[in-house]
Amino acid sequence: MKYAGRLVFYGRRNPKPMSKKYKSWFRCFDGCGERYGLGEIIYRCRRCESLLEVCHDFDALAETSPGEWKSKFSSRRQVVSGPLAGGVWAKKEWVCPEVEDKNIVSLGEGYTPLLKLDGFFKTPELNNVYVKLCGSSHTGSFKDLGLTVLVSMVRQMRSHGVEIPAVACASTGDTSAALAAYCARAGLPCIVFLPEGKITPSQLIQPVSNGAITLAIDTDFDGCMELVQQVTSEENIDLANSMNSLRIEGQKTVAIEIAEQLNWQVPDWVVIPGGNLGNVSALGLGFRMMHRLGLIDRLPRICCAQSKRANPLYRSYISSFNKFEPIEAEKTLASAIQIGNPVSIRKAIDTLKDFNGIVEQAGEQQIMDACAAADRAGLFSCPHTGVALAALKKLIGRGLVAPDHRVVVISTAHGLKFPQFKIDYHWGEAGELDNPDANPPEKVENSLEAVRSAIYRRLD
Ligand SMILES: *Cc1c(COP(=O)(O)O)cnc(C)c1O
Ligand SMILES: [Zn+2]
């Protein structure tokens, strides 16, 4: 009965179900050749311990011409329900064709605005800078793009009888929020490992509200990461950190969206903040895939931006990537990238080499100043976006970004998830950091005269 029903369904609309026509699988990232099915609970190669990557059948994908892909993608923007809805699943063939439609767990992720950034740079000739607002998403960060794919795949494995009692992650706040939301949507148990006192209340309340088992542990992110890896390697609990390369497949759609929003013109530069470094490799993957399938004719340069207080990639970069040493990350305003031992370091370095990439860093004052300037221009910037904006300023200063360059800055989270550093700034409580643009609310007596005088004092 089940089989017949399926045949009828696909028989009318599509001679072959997508999951049959397009294939994807895990492959060892070190090129040792090992392949694994996407339905396996596996994050590292069993033969050589290296991270895995997801591969696609490019021959099958290339049967559709670049123009046809472009019009497919743009026509799917109109779809509001069903398996092709949302910015990730609209590109299902490129992302994870293995997932059966009925297993997709979506919360309307993707299709975030690409906003022209006017008024941020005082130099008028720099008017081709855009911000990709990935934080305008269900849980307020780009993590939604990856977790929709991972949680869908877990639901599929469970529906095929694989015993997965729960999904777990270590997080600097945003991964846990996204994982908890998608698990709640799918009815899956979820466990989040959080460094106690190192994430914002807005981030903490998300998994709590979504019913996740929320563990606040007396360590930092890197410590949580070690613990979660131990737990998931001993139980059959699925690990949802970015070493799980299914997430990267969802996150790479940000590159495709950017290209589409720019009418398939490739930016000269993309600036992206990096912590565990999965997202920078996802960005590269998206551009590489479009290039290989002929949708774009060149690649952008990529700048990965780090906080000076959590800069292991930057340190490696200045040694021409000849060495890499994990560090102990210090407390930084950019708390979601306070990571000293990034899991995806090798993938990130590969990506940067491929994209003629560079690494920049930003200090705390520079992060503050960049956010304040962005907010004055109408954004409400999270500190990680501030890291990227500060890095961009440096690239302009060094002449690497020219006035006629088209630049995209990846804004990774919504500013409303990180209000405290702005409060400190405007209230004058940011310690040794300067706050030249502080604009605290003014206490005014309840009278027309007092109100008028308060207003006109400021408007003059
Ligand atoms: C996760 C995260 C990052 C860093 O992404 P990585 O893939 O870990 O490099 C940056 N900004 C925000 C807001 C995040 O949540
Ligand atoms: Zn291997």
Image (spheres, helix red, strand yellow):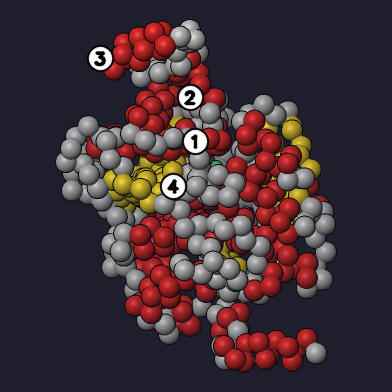
Q: Earlier in the sequence, mark 1 or mark 2?
A: 1
Q: Are marks 1 and 4 in contact (CB under 8 Å)?
A: no
Number of numbered discs visible in the structure rendering:
4
Give the residue at the far front of this rendering.
448
Q: Earlier in the sequence, mark 3 or mark 1?
A: 1
Q: Give how far across and how far down residue 208 sits, in percent.
A: 74, 39
Going by the image, does 249 lie left or right of 216? Answer: left
Q: Residue at x 40, y 49 (%)?
A: 132
Label 2: few (<14), some (14–19) or many (≥20) C-alpha neighbours in 10 Å = many
Q: Nearer the viewer, residue 76 or 386?
A: 76
Depth-wise, is mark 4 or mark 3 nearer the camera? 3
Indicate the quadrant containing the N terminus: top left, top right, bottom left or bottom right. Answer: bottom right
Q: Give how far across and how far down residue 89 sits, in percent.
A: 55, 67
Residue 316 showing in the rendered view: no
Vertical order, 124 against 56 (above or below): above
Q: Residue at x 47, y 61 (%)?
A: 253
Residue position for label 4 = 133
Depth-wise, is mark 3 or mark 1 nearer the camera? 3
Q: Is mark 1 within 8 Å of ligand 1?
A: no
Q: Residue at x 63, y 36 (%)?
A: 203
Label 4: few (<14), some (14–19) or many (≥20) C-alpha neighbours in 10 Å = many
* Mark-to-mark CA distance, 3 and 1: 30 Å
Residue 297 showing in the rendered view: yes
Question: Which label sits on residue 415?
Answer: 1
